[in-house]
Image: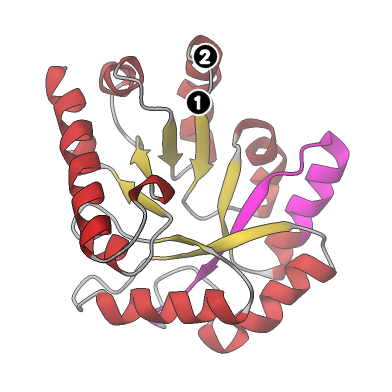
Amino acid sequence: MSDVSANLTEIQARITKRAKKWGEDPDTVTLIAVSKQQPIDRVEAALKAGHRVYGENRVQEAQGKWPELKEKYDGTELHLIGPLQSNKAKDAVALFDVIQTVDRPKIARALADEMKKSGRNLPVYIQINIGAEDQKAGIDIADADAFIAECRDVYGLDVQGLMCIPPAEEQPAPFFALLGKIAKRNGLSKLSMGMSSDYEIAVQFGASLVRVGTGVFGARG
């Protein structure tokens, strides 16, 4: 699995190069290795290479592999980057370290309730439907400011940043720029944006976290 280690090294180098080119600090950009649907041996190859930040799309899939891996590899940080159903909030709070897909009041309320019960005050990101696509999750752009305030003031969530997935068939740069504007006017400094095909552009526009799956692990099984 030396290719996984080599991929991680190459991606980090690309992040550093792009960040420096545009006057960004590469040390402020975190690579999230998206391990959904990846075989355990490939995930362990990344862990053995020293990488410690991972993303999963589904709570149930993550429950099947990460409790044992987190116990085995100290310092592992797990992000939920896929849609969350309210009936999975308890499991998500118990397993994940960061929830990136808060996109409606029902989820915000469920997470707040479960965090209070468990005593785990997890950082959260608000997912914005940046391309106004019917098929995608995320709060509408027009409702973003009010929802961010609601998550903070009503539910007491630790809102650390914003997350988005731009439309696949369009240039991502304008969408990344727009996410940055929404974050800035709401006093948020962290942006989770950019995937295998566009993470370098995301870094140019101030990404704090980039979510890379196939670039790290290869095609999913």
Tell me the amino acid under the disc marked 2. Answer: Glu
* Residues at marks 1 and 2 touching, judged by CB atoms closer than 8 Å: no
x and y percentages locating residue 10 in the rendered image: 15, 37
Q: Which residue is mark 1?
A: 76
**Is 132 placed left or right of 155 in the picture?**
left
Q: CA distance from mark 1 to mark 2?
A: 11 Å
Left or right of 118 on screen, residue 23: left
SS class of the residue under badge 1? loop
- In this rendering, the answer to whether 28 lies above or below 4 is below
Whole-percent x, y for residue 49 in the image: 29, 19
Q: Residue at x 55, y 20 (%)?
A: 67
Rate crowding at label 2 as few (under 14), some (14 to 19) or many (20 or more) other CA atoms within 10 Å.
few
Q: Which mark is residue 198?
A: none
- Tell me if I can see residue 207 in this picture: yes
Q: Position of residue 44 (x, y in %)?
A: 33, 17
Whether residue 184 is in magenta: the answer is no
Work out whether mark 1 precedes mark 2 in sequence or the reverse, and give the earlier one.
Answer: 2
Q: Residue at x 20, y 24 (%)?
A: 5
Residue at the (74%, 75%) spot, across then down: 149
Compared with 158, 64 (above or below) is above
Report the span colored magenta: 109-131
Quadrant in which the N terminus appears: top left
Q: Position of residue 126 (x, y in %)?
A: 58, 65
Q: Label 2, on which residue? A: 68
Q: Amino acid at mark 1?
A: Thr
Residue lying at the far top of the rendered structure = 72
Q: Nearer the viewer, residue 220 or 10?
A: 10
Q: Nearer the viewer, mark 1 or mark 2?
A: 1
- Is residue 29 rendered to the left or right of residue 160? left
Q: Is residue 124 magenta?
A: yes
Q: Quadrant of residue 139?
A: bottom right
